[in-house]
Image (spheres, coloured by chain):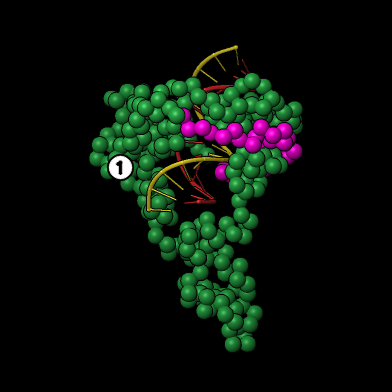
Chain colours: A green, B red, C yellow
DNA sequence: CTGGGGAAGGGGCCC
DNA sequence: GGGGCCCCTTCCCCA
């Protein structure tokens, strides 16, 4: 994921963009949350189990999926779900939900069309798109067509007024706009964040709270992802592998560094 | 130079 | 629809 869009830090107010016209209210976290506690008790993740970082599959840059990595394609067997995330539903379920919100991508009209047509000539292709009249022999074929073409062309597009990004849902756009408005402000240092939980993570840098402990050494981390990266250092076979020299790395960035240093071009 | 830690970002999913 | 949480990724810094 490119970081070109990452929100700049605005410690210097002179450099801070003028978001005063924005309508999102600023959220100020009470200082009681900083020192008064109770700091929310974050249950120790199941990562503490010995299977948490058992490396099995190794990614190379050529085999890496585009981000984000789906849970079911996790390079480490049993790894993500062991970190407390519920396993995702089967792909057949997500395909119809992820791209069209909670509504079914097939309208009532489509449902009628889906019923078996009486015309014997239409027997072979009985699923017809209500938008372009293109016919498909299978329901999944029609579904795929609608998601990739017709629906994408006809559904509303929500554009960000601060940048050129577009979203298919208003909710996604609103979430994105927060990255411009930065409504969550740290009362200690004044740094602003797009979401409350980002601020909470930032507050840990002030409090020193590190709820994520490594089961194999004494280290603890404030961020779960950093613990996950750390766990790789305990593994003999790292998660990311150079496709040329087979050397493995604990982080993709290290693999990229390695490749950019000339290993891959030398062969 | 390399590897690792710290911090922070966005999008997606679930409730 | 919004909040909370998760995962992945990236950048910076340091040993």
Residue A182 image offset from top left, x and y in percent = 35, 36
Total labels: the figure holds 1
Residue density around tag 1, few if under 14, some if 14–19, many if 20 or more, within 10 Å = some
| In the image, residue C2 above or below residue A233 | below
Figure quadrant of the C terminus of chain A? top right
Residue A157 in sight here: yes
Residue found at x 45% / y 22%: A207
Residue at the spot of label 1: A24
The residue lying furthest to the left in this view is: A21
Residue A259 in the figure: left or right of residue A11: right
For residue A114: magenta?
no
For residue A62: magenta?
yes
Residue A9 in sight here: no
Residue A81: quadrant of the picture? top right
For the record, the magenta segment spans A39-68
Residue found at x 58% / y 29%: A212
The answer for which chain carries disc 1 is A
Residue A243 image offset from top left, x and y in percent = 72, 35
A23 and A121: which is toward the camera: A23
Residue A220 image offset from top left, x and y in percent = 59, 24
Residue found at x 36% / y 43%: A177
Secondary structure beneath label 1: loop
Residue A69 in the figure: left or right of residue C4: right
Residue found at x 39% / y 49%: A173
| Secondary structure mostly seen in the magenta stretch | loop
| In the image, residue A2 above or below residue A135 | above
Residue A157 in the figure: left or right of residue A135: left
A137 and A263: which is toward the camera: A137
A248 and A260: which is toward the camera: A248
């Amino acid at each position: 994921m490119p970081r070109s869009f990452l929100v700049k830090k605005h410690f210097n107010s002179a450099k801070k963009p003028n978001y005063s016209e924005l309508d999102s209210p600023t959220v100020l976290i009470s200082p009681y949350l900083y020192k008064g506690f109770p700091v929310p008790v974050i249950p120790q993740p199941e990562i503490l189990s010995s299977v948490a970082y058992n490396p099995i599959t190794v990614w190379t840059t050529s085999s890496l999926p585009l981000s984000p990595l789906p849970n079911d394609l996790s390079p480490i067997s049993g790894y993500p779900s062991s970190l407390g995330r519920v396993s995702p539903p089967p792909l057949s379920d997500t395909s119809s939900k992820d791209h069209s919100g909670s509504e079914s991508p097939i309208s009532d009209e489509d449902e009628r069309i889906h019923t078996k047509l009486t015309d014997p000539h239409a027997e072979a292709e009985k699923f017809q798109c209500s938008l372009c009249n293109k016919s498909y022999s299978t329901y999944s074929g029609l579904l795929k067509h609608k998601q990739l073409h017709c629906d994408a062309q006809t559904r509303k597009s929500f554009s960000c007024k601060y940048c050129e990004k577009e979203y298919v849902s208003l909710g996604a756009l609103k979430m994105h706009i927060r990255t411009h408005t930065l409504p969550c402000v740290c009362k200690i240092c004044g740094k602003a964040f797009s979401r409350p939980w980002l601020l909470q993570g930032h507050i840990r840098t002030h409090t020193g709270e590190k709820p994520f402990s490594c089961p194999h050494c004494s280290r603890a981390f404030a961020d779960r992802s950093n613990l996950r990266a750390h766990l790789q250092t305990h593994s003999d076979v790292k998660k990311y592998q150079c496709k040329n020299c087979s050397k493995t790395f604990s982080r993709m960035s290290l693999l990229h560094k390695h490749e950019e240093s000339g290993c891959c071009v030398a062969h």
